[in-house]
């Protein structure tokens, strides 16, 4: 069973601070995706990283895929209250003719004004 | 609005009952995925359909079943409901039948079994 461990589980910071959340596994993934989920809504895809060592930026968010494609990090610069939400990572792995997406349990981020 | 429509948004029912959750995928998407989300287990994959056919199965109980219709909408049927089935149920869709790509999720159905 492939597991994705996300840390920290909870994070509460002040507006303007920087933060990094992590997603780790002992398994290799074909790609890794990050989603943000707000209360009462479904997860929304933020980014997909495919190549080991790949770095993608989305405004104040920087996503990195580990060289070995087993882990990833999400760094937020100058956090805003609108960044509050549950951040989920998901790893895609090939299982025969079909890909399987495994989700971590998420990091619940609260950005206080 | 993600383009994936789930109904109903909330459902309260008694133990032993049967309910049907409905999902309309984003226009052009052929795959539909069902997930269950609970506080302790996170997002758990239940089942995937691609263009009307079952493509993959996850941790779906025998009391649960699903189907995808010719118009590509999907229904998840939950029967003999137990208190532990209370959770958020999400439907997601994608263009491809397989591939390391992201999904588009609906807003979910919150099921409460009392």
Image: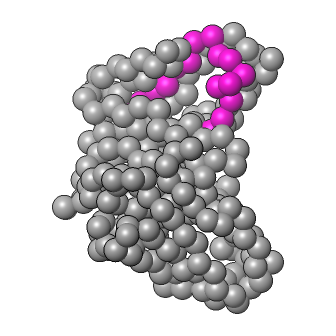
Q: Is residue B12 left or right of residue A61?
A: right
Q: Is residue B41 visible?
A: no
Q: Is residue B97 visible?
A: yes
Question: In the rendered image of this protein, does residue B101 appear above or below residue A76?
Answer: below
Q: Quadrant of the N terminus of chain A?
A: bottom left
Q: Quadrant of the C terminus of chain A?
A: top right
Q: How is the image coloured?
A: one colour
Question: In the rendered image of this protein, does residue A63 appear above or below residue B17?
Answer: above
Residue A81 belongs to the span the image colors magenta: yes
Q: Position of residue A86 (x, y in %)?
A: 63, 38
Q: Residue at x 39, y 53 (%)?
A: B27
Q: Position of residue A66 (x, y in %)?
A: 34, 27
Q: Which residues are magenta?
A: A71-86
Q: Is residue B43 left or right of residue B50?
A: right
Q: Residue at x 26, y 42 (%)?
A: A30
Residue placed most toward the observer, B67 or A48: B67
Q: Can you tell which quarter of the image residue B37 is in? A: bottom right
Q: Residue at x 55, y 27 (%)?
A: A21
Q: Position of residue A97 (x, y in %)?
A: 19, 61
Q: Position of residue B41 (x, y in %)?
A: 59, 58
Residue placed most toward the observer, B28 or A69: B28
Question: In the rendered image of this protein, does residue B82 appear above or below residue B47?
Answer: below
Q: Residue at x 56, y 18 (%)?
A: A76
Count numbered badges in the picture: 0
Residue that lies at the very extreme toward the left in this rendered image:
A97
Residue placed most toward the observer, A81 or A70: A81
Residue B83 belongs to the span the image colors magenta: no
């Amino acid at each position: 069973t492939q597991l994705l461990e996300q840390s920290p589980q909870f994070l509460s910071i002040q507006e303007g601070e920087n933060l990094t959340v992590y997603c780790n596994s002992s398994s290799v993934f074909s790609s890794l995706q990050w989603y943000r989920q707000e209360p009462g809504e479904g997860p929304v895809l933020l980014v997909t990283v495919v190549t080991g060592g790949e770095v993608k930026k989305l405004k104040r968010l920087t996503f990195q895929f580990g060289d070995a494609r087993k882990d990833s990090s999400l760094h937020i610069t100058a956090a805003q209250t609108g960044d509050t939400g549950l951040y989920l990572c998901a790893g895609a792995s090939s299982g025969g003719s079909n890909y399987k997406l495994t989700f971590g349990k998420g990091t619940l981020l609260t950005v206080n004004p | 609005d993600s383009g994936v429509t789930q109904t109903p948004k909330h459902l309260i029912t008694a133990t032993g009952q049967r309910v049907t959750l409905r999902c309309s995928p984003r226009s052009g998407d052929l795959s539909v995925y069902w997930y269950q989300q609970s506080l302790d287990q996170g997002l758990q994959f239940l089942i995937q359909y691609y263009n009307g056919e079952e493509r993959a199965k996850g941790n779906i109980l025998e009391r649960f079943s699903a189907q995808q219709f010719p118009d590509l909408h999907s229904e998840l049927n939950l029967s003999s409901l137990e208190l532990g089935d209370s959770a958020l149920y999400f439907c997601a869709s994608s263009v491809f039948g397989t591939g390391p790509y992201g999904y588009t999720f609906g807003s979910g159905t919150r099921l409460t079994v009392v």
